[in-house]
Amino acid sequence: MTTATWLTQIRAAPMRTQQWWVLSTRLIAPSVRTGEVLASVLAPATFTASFYIPLRIVMTFAGTGFSSYAQFMMPIVILQAAAFTAVSSAFRAATDSVAGLNRRFGSMPVGPLVPVAARMSSNVFRLVIALITALICGHVIGFRFYLDTAHTLGFLLLSLLIGITLTLGADVIGTVSRSPESTTQALVLPPLIFGMLSTGLAPANQFPTWVQPFVRNQPISQYAIALRALAGDSGPNAGQVTWSLMGPPVAWVIGTLLLCIPFVIRLSARRA
């Protein structure tokens, strides 16, 4: 092989990292310039105010077993912020699919997984902003980390991992969708339903007896229980970080990822 031929092949097959960076910038930069990223700031603030202001007095009388209602409800703010980011990611994936960008990338020397990796980079960027805003809002209303640095890092990492899992699943749904608007409308309901029928806003014993098994064991409740244990409390009711407590939420995360990743690979291979 001559030097000229080798250089031609190198130019025709650009590095995947460069492709990922260019496509990621294509998604992140416009959202910053147009102010779209402000939605990642406003959503957690809205969730915090919507949950805390009307329910604080009620739950003070009803009781949660925690030192404050802010300490009890903080996980659901985190989870709703992650769910909002997931809905937005589904809309972006559906928009790219309907606009024909996936087919266009398939006709170019772009790695099969590069477009979805770029979308996920944009999703994680907005997710991190949403989680930081949620923590700031929680601090304002009284949420605190009561345990050591390792537990605090565990809280942050689990929150981020849950958000990435939700956005990856939403990206898969958006990629196979034919309508960004209908996809967004369909994905708004599940977080609301699972959030209301969970231990995120009230303890399970305050629900009707017939629905308590679902409330305790559904994934949103398991995530909330794990996050409360990692955050701790001034009292003894936050729970201990043990394998029996952390096992179910971790299993939900791993199971969702194992379900989504094959779809991501298959859809990317089909595009290529």
Image (cartoon, rainbow, N blue to C red):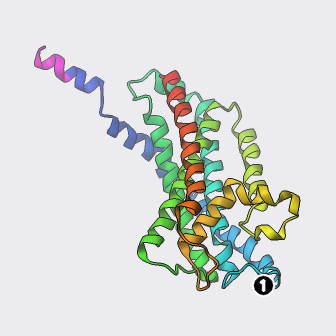
Amino acid found under the numbered disc labelled 1: Thr
On the image, which quarter does residue 221 sit in? bottom right
Q: Nearer the viewer, residue 65 or 107?
A: 65
Where does residue 70 sit, x and y in percent of width and height? Answer: 66, 79
User: Is residue 71 shown to the viewer in this render?
Assistant: yes
Q: Secondary structure at mark 1?
A: helix
Q: Nearer the viewer, residue 61 or 100?
A: 61
Q: Is residue 3 left or right of residue 100?
A: left
On the image, which quarter does residue 35 sit in? bottom right
Where does residue 9 sit, x and y in percent of width and height? Answer: 24, 21
Q: Residue furthest top?
A: 1
Q: Residue furthest left?
A: 2
Where does residue 99 sit, x and y in percent of width and height? Answer: 60, 31
Q: Is residue 22 above or below residue 243?
A: above
Residue bearing mark 1: 60
Q: Is residue 84 left or right of residue 7?
A: right
Q: Is residue 90 above or below residue 202?
A: above
How crowded pointer 1 is (Cα within 10 Å; few <14, some 14-19, many 20+) is rated as some
Q: Residue at x 60, y 42 (%)?
A: 169
Membership of 61 in magenta stretch: no
Where does residue 140 sit, x and y in percent of width and height? Answer: 60, 82
| Magenta stretch bounds | 1-7
On the image, which quarter does residue 71 sit in? bottom right
Q: Residue at x 47, y 61 (%)?
A: 157
Q: Residue at x 81, y 61 (%)?
A: 212
Is the N terminus in the top left, top right, bottom left or bottom right quadrant? top left
